[in-house]
Image (tube, rainbow, N blue to C red):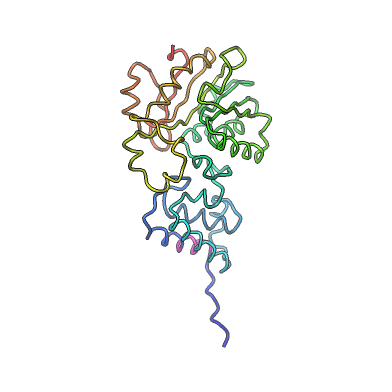
């Protein structure tokens, strides 16, 4: 007797089944996908060799039983390993742009990406301007900046050589090795002494800012990432103090420093009550990212 034919599933139905499997497990999200349905879309789209956004245009297409089985298997691996999906796939998406991703760097995610892509930072980026991405990780923000403003020169630095090796691969992937310089060092130590050649119109930074109490409660997915890229000391402000101290030396006269501080709004206000920060509106609200004009740092 011939085996029963497998019922044909649409892409949409496959995503629903994968999402149900993920929802039954105690997983944490926030590494490129905000919930189980978003992560299920990402898992299924990978089997179809499509971007997650392109897969949304093919929800009523039939998915092969083989690809559906692969998607379920990957979802099970995600549950069993409790690692970020980006590490299992070797790829992450930020603002629709793909990046290589692995344990050498945290998974790319930043509210700053929205500001770059929406053009909110262009007032601080003159033609032929210069920008610096401090704590670049896998290079994603520097790359988004270079893609959005092809006429500027971008420098990107990180203390981690493994992260910079991954960033280098991402620069090659997007053909930006000429427009972006990668530098190794601990914050300002990556740069030469301040001079006219290394003053920047805009410095962006998504630094390690998780406070000690929050670090002690991180779920498994976040513990799979390098703690060096997350831990910001007792109040989350350790690196931010160094960044703010050194920024005036490397900013042009009308330049600005853009910082992401995540959920550390209260700790920032307590640490820097004298700084007139401009709080930037992103999809997570107006207490996650701030901009400080060079003149307000002196």
Q: Is residue 65 magenta?
A: no
Residue closer to the observer: 298 or 185: 185
| Residue 266 against residue 74 in the figure, above or below | above
Q: Give the residues in magenta.
A: 11-17
Quarter of the figure with residue 242: top left
Quarter of the figure with residue 181: top right
Quarter of the figure with residue 22: bottom left
Residue occupying image coordinates x 33% and y 24% = 269
Quarter of the picture containing the N terminus is bottom right
Residue 248 relative to residue 161: left or right: left
Query: How many labels sit on residues?
Result: 0
Residue 254's spot in the image, x, y percent? 52, 14
Residue 24 relative to residue 136: left or right: left
| Residue 139 against residue 100 in the figure, above or below | above
Res. 98 visible in picture: no
Residue 166's spot in the image, x, y percent? 59, 39
Residue 144's spot in the image, x, y percent? 57, 34
Residue 156 relative to residue 275: left or right: right
Quarter of the picture containing the C terminus is top left
Give the farthest residue toward the bottom: 1
Main SS, magenta region, reads helix
Res. 59 visible in picture: yes
Residue occupying image coordinates x 59% and y 27% = 183
């Amino acid at each position: 007797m011939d085996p029963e034919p497998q019922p044909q599933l649409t892409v949409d139905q496959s995503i629903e089944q994968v999402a149900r499997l993920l929802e039954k497990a105690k997983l944490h999200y926030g590494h490129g996908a905000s919930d189980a349905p978003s992560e299920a879309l990402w898992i299924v789209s990978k089997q179809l060799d499509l971007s997650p956004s392109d897969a949304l245009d093919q929800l009523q297409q039939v998915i092969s039983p083989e690809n559906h089985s692969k998607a379920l298997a990957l979802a099970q691996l995600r549950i069993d390993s409790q690692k970020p999906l980006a590490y299992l796939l070797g790829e992450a998406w930020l603002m629709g742009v793909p990046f290589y991703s692995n344990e050498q760097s945290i998974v790319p995610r930043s509210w700053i990406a929205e500001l770059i892509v929406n053009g909110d930072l262009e007032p601080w980026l003159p033609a032929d301007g210069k920008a610096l991405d401090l704590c670049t990780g896998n290079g994603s923000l520097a790359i988004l900046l270079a893609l959005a403003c092809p006429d500027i020169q971008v420098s990107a630095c990180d203390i981690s050589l493994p992260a910079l090796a991954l960033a280098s691969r991402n620069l090659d992937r997007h053909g930006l090795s000429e427009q972006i310089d990668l530098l190794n060092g601990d914050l300002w130590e990556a740069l030469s002494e301040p001079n006219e050649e290394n003053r920047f119109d805009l410095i962006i930074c998504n630094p390690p800012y998780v406070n000690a109490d929050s670090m002690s409660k991180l779920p498994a997915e976040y513990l799979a990432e390098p703690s060096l890229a997350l831990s910001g000391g007792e109040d989350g402000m350790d690196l931010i103090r160094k960044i703010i101290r050194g920024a005036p030396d490397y900013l042009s006269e009308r330049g600005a420093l853009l910082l992401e501080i995540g959920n550390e709004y209260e700790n920032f206000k307590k640490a820097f009550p004298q700084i007139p920060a401009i709080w930037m509106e992103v999809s997570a609200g107006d207490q996650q990212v701030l901009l400080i004009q060079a003149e307000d740092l002196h």
